[in-house]
Image (cartoon, helix red, strand yellow):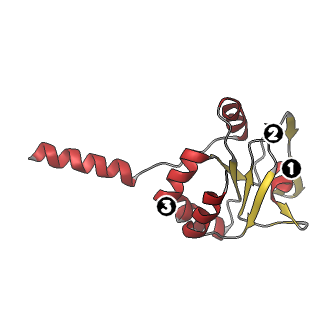
Amino acid sequence: MKKLLLIILVLMANENFAQLKTHTFEQAEEMSKANPKPFVIFIHTDWCKFCKTMENTTFKNKAIINKLNQDFYFISFNAEEKRDIIFKENTFKFKPKGNNSGIHELATILGDKNGNVVYPTITILNPDYSIVAQLQSYIGPKELLEILSKIQ
């Protein structure tokens, strides 16, 4: 009886702790060559409260995790990332704006909508890298799941 209970607890723990698979731009691009899927790019910063809320609610939702892991390449991208990123055969760099501030070129390219980059932004790319959607501001699990279900 104790063994059965232990097995049930282990199985339940695995389901409750489903992990969202995150990739770098380079990893997602490489994996897409063999298995083309759309990209979901979560553009955020460390100081953005709505970004943190999405990380702790939307991206912890089991249905969202399953959908993203199965049908997309998910990239969590800090817009203030300082490392160079190679994507689509181009090198993108961090652009400082002052003391300890700036924005990565790739965040500007993928997150700009009507001349503004808002945090958080979710940009969805087709496997051919064309932009399908740019969703600015907080998005809850139910709304994001509806949007993701319409893509592909």
92 on left or right of 147: right
Q: Which residue is mark 2?
A: 84
Q: Which residue is mark 3?
A: 61
**Which SS class for mark 2?**
loop
Q: Looking at the image, how many numbered discs can be counted on the residues?
A: 3
Q: Which residue is mark 1?
A: 105
Dot 2, crowdedness within 10 Å: few (<14), some or many (≥20)? some
68 versus 135 height, above or below: above
Dot 1, crowdedness within 10 Å: few (<14), some or many (≥20)? some
Dot 3, crowdedness within 10 Å: few (<14), some or many (≥20)? some
106 versus 61 height, above or below: above
Q: Are marks 3 and 1 in contact (CB under 8 Å)?
A: no
State which quadrant residue 7 falls in.
top left
Of residues 116 and 83, the one drawn nearer to the viewer in this rendering: 116
In the image, what residue occupies the spot 32% across and 51% down? 13
Q: Name the amino acid type tagged 3.
A: Asn
Point out residue 142 in the picture as x, y percentages from the top left corner: 55, 69
In the image, what residue occupies the spot 85% across and 44% down? 93
